[in-house]
Image (cartoon, coloured by chain):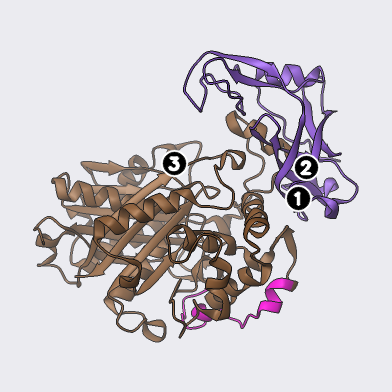
Chain colours: A brown, B purple
Amino acid sequence: MKNARDPVIVGLADAPIEDGKFVTKASVLGHAALVAKAAVEEAGLTLDDVDGLLTAGMWGVPGPGQLATVTLGEYLGIMPTYVDGTNIGGSAFEAHVAHAAMALREGYCEVALIVYSSDQKSLRSRNLGGRPSVLSMQHETPYGMPTPVGGYAMAAQRHMHEYGSTSENLAEIAVATRKWAQLNPAATRRDPLTIDDVLSSTMISEPLHLLDCCLVTDGAGAIVMTTAERAKDLKTKPIAVKGYGEAHTHWAVAEMPDLARLLPAQKAGETAMKMAGVTHSDIDVVEVYDSFTITVLLTLEALGFCKIGEGGDFVSGQRTAPGGAFPMNTNGGGLSALHPGMYGMFLLIEASRQLRGDCGDRQVTGAETALVHGTGGTLSSGATVILQKD
Amino acid sequence: MSIEKPLPVIDHDSAPYWEAAREGRLDIPLCGDCGKHHFYPRAICPHCHSDNLKFDTVSGRGEVHTFTIARRPAGPAFADDVPYVVALIELEEGPRMMSRVQTDDPEAVKIGAKVEVTFVKATDEVTFPYFKMI
């Protein structure tokens, strides 16, 4: 049953990057502002219409970035009356869509703007080492845990041990994702890639190779949400937010309850699909966080697209590649398109563009329902959003 | 010039644990209500949320639950250690803790390998519980 206050996505924008770096000269907040403006204008709105502001980021910490919505609101020159600075890692933006959806339904805001920006590639700031080993990290960092790759490597090792998945299975994901990137002019890495290339790339943290790891790039993106009622007067075709869920389990890798299973994804996925009233066979396109190839394998299992332990078989034979039975990460993902630190924003943008039918060579035919799943921290948090062509 | 390795920032929860490690003991919290050990040390039991906790000297034996061989260091401070084995150790008493497996043969480390604690002094303040295969 449709309701006038049903939440919809009406504006999208992302910043152009070249060789992984911003093309435009602006600060990290400048890029946030430019995509924010572009996203509201695409919808036929202005920044003055925005009364809900949601953001998360790693810029300006310690300092102004600690109060991220406050600093961004100031930069944009707006006074939002609903704000959410939830930061659960790269999945924060899927959670923001959920929180904005609830706020819109309840009448807490009319136009919600979700923004992310990072200039980590230009600043060469990705190294997570050198942070003081406080609280739970005092029991992890001093042992030389490679961050963030080490935790993912430990999960991969455990998955291989319990279920017999292989490095070849993981490489299938990297190769299929690259094929999508080759269809996306905006993707950073578009050169051909084979399974052998992945397996012979530098070993970083066993069993993960360099080409099992996502890119390090700049990037900025924005999403505008409003109610179905308000969307009637706007310029874009609205995308409905039908369901959402979120969960998290740990920060320290040692605290992950099950190294071979992604419990937050399981919980968030179940919640979101139940709310949306959809089953796996209703999903036409899947965008899931690919910080590392193993992240994808664990996510597909946890979301129930295959049984726990069968992810390796599921992705074999280039099933997730263009033309395969399971279109996934259709922009080229974090592995080949872009990965500016917290990638979840770009999963949502790509899913929405697929449902709009705006994806050119990489368009998934007849895409009406999309599942988006973000993962944050070190397999710490998960948030799922189900989107549908209205 | 070598770069100093990160040291734990010891707090009130963890002080007895680090003090025991300095003295060559592995002491972790034991809950007086549910009878379970936990790690890392907290002010309440993460299993039953009781605050009836005391530090208990455990066996120091366990097995490798999972691990990675770092072929690239976690920052320049660890460059001289490469390759090294960071491992999640499951103690006989149940809790898991992150540590190192000390070995000249990283390839020999396997999930399920039996290990025993060995104490490695870093500074006058800090001694790390590492593990060795037995």
Query: Few, some or many C-alpha atoms within 10 Å of disc 1 (few <14, some 14-19, many ≥20)?
Result: many
- Position of residue A282 relative to residue A322, above or below, is above
Residue farthest along the right direction in this orientation: B104
SS assignment at label 3: helix
Considering the whole magenta stretch, tell me its main secondary structure.
Answer: loop
Quick check: B6 left or right of A278? Answer: right
Dots 1, 2 in contact, CB < 8 A: yes
Return the residue at label 1.
B73
User: Cα distance, mark 2 to mark 3?
Assistant: 28 Å
Q: Nearer the viewer, mark 1 or mark 2?
A: 1
SS assignment at label 2: helix
Q: Residue at x 41, y 64 (%)?
A: A347
Picture coordinates of residue A237 (x, y %)? 19, 72
| Residue A44 visible, this angle | yes
User: Cα distance, mark 1 to mark 3?
Assistant: 29 Å
Residues drawn in magenta: A179-199
User: Cα distance, mark 1 to mark 2?
Assistant: 8 Å
Picture coordinates of residue A105 (x, y %)? 16, 50
Return the residue at label 3.
A65
Return the residue at label 2.
B77
Picture coordinates of residue A374 (x, y %)? 43, 56
Q: Residue at x 47, y 22 (%)?
A: B49
Query: Few, some or many C-alpha atoms within 10 Å of disc 3 (few <14, some 14-19, many ≥20)?
Result: some
Q: Residue at x 56, y 14 (%)?
A: B32
Quick check: A61 left or right of B96? Answer: left
